Image: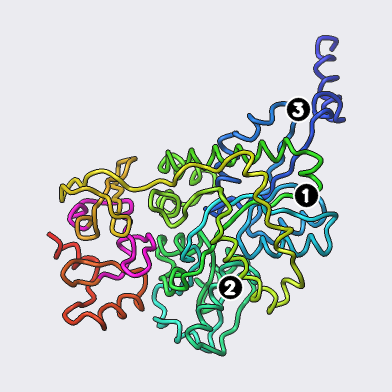
Amino acid sequence: MKRGFPALLALALTACGVGNASDQTTVVIGYQSKTINTVTAGTLLRSLGYLEKRLGPKYRVVWQDYSTGAPITAQMVAGKIDIGSMGDYPMLINGSRNQQFGDGHTKLVAATGYNLRGALNMVVVGPKSSIHGLKDLAGKKISASVGSAGHGTTVHALDRAGVTGFRIQNQVPAVGASALQSGSVDALGQFVAWPGQLVFAGQARLLYDGAALNLPTWHGVVVRERYANDHPQVLEAFLRALTDATNYLNQNPMQAALSVAKETRLPPEVVYLYNGPNGMVTFGTALKPELRDALDQDIPFLASIGNIKRLDLNAFWDPSALQRTGPAGPPARITGTDPVCGIPVDDPAKAGEVWFVGETQTHPAANPTCLLRQIGDRKVRAAYVPSTDTGTRWFADKSIWVRDKEFLPFTTEDGAERYVSGHPGARIVSYSDALRGSR
């Protein structure tokens, strides 16, 4: 009994908060584990331990995982989350709500990932759905997370196509995915990684590629101004750790994808679709002017649905802290020599990758036709090609293929049909026919 007393006393003191823990400064991080383009500020950063290493034992990092940005904003308004990562629409709502209701303003201090054309948001339908174009959504029910970038893309795309009478069902992504499979909604408009995940699993078909809007969509980092002022060393450490994680991902895209897949239980092939070289997400920390311009274009929509009453964007946008720490290095790119065609892989508009079964590294392809030849009869985990019209990186076997002078992939039926209508002699072919025809 006497020999066990010191251990029991230590346990009791720890439980009461006595000891090193009571001397620690706490930083609470809100993140979205399955939102691929925030992994450098969340899932990957957490698994690498870069923030804890930079802060040292005097600090305690608490990670809180959410499915969307809305609850992170609610917790920041209440002063319970200090730093959060989220998409462009939720970021604007965050800035507005904190300026209106919070215990102090929040600041947008860095980017995490972006797609300058908008491909990170997509609309999908059931794999056997009779819906084949946006106009077929007139009068239909569409699941979306209201106030998210996926919601905005869906509404903008339908408005641009002149579609009316559709009904938005406000649902979180997981509920919307279930609703699509059950048939209680006709389509799902969501952000990464939901469209890729559902299509890869054969549970959905891509109807609309957000890149057709040609409007940047992106995710970034916001911090409570009061916390940043009280603990500037924490914000600096976070931004340096964010840069470290971004550089790690860009330098080790496959290892990063496998790590994120393990943490989130997302398929590695889906994670790599987004964060691989030439991926759908460009990972970088700099607050670029075109990202600021995108926010200016997003504000009217959020105001029209009542999610923003007022926002001083100049007070919210703050690149000063990142300027002190420095931005991340260049994004990953597909390079090398095509192993079948024997030519350099140097055109990002055509370059792809093949991931064969049983291998842990991909093989570069100079263009879509070379990629098809490389696949041949071999079994693949995934093959990735850029869409001919939008440049969006997509799964080769889920793409719509056109045979012209060469084989051309498209993310959507609409895109392929538009090309065929403008190119006499071109025709849509199946993926299996494209594989056979490329030999």
Q: Which residue is mark 3?
A: 58
Quadrant that contains the C terminus: bottom left
In the depicted structure, whether residue 15 falls above or below residue 426: above
Q: Residue at x 40, y 65 (%)?
A: 202
How far separated are the C-alphas under marks 2 and 3? 42 Å
The answer to which of marks 2 and 3 sits earlier in the sequence is 3
Mark nearest the camera among 1 and 3 is 1
Q: Is residue 184 visible?
A: no
Q: Start and end of the magenta stretch?
A: 372-401
Residue 100 falls left or right of residue 336: right
Kindly indicate the quadrant of the structure image that contains residue 127. bottom left
- Is 261 placed above or below 11 here? below
Q: Are marks 2 and 3 in contact (CB under 8 Å)?
A: no
Q: Earlier in the sequence, mark 2 or mark 1?
A: 2
Disc 3, SS: loop
**Identity, as a three-letter code, of the amino acid under mark 1:** Glu
The residue that label 2 is drawn on is 152
Of residues 19 and 120, which is closer to you in this image? 120
**Amino acid beneath label 2:** Gly
List the residue tagged with mark 1. Answer: 225
- The percent coordinates of residue 15 (x first, y second) are 83, 30
Residue that appears at 23% across and 55% down: 371
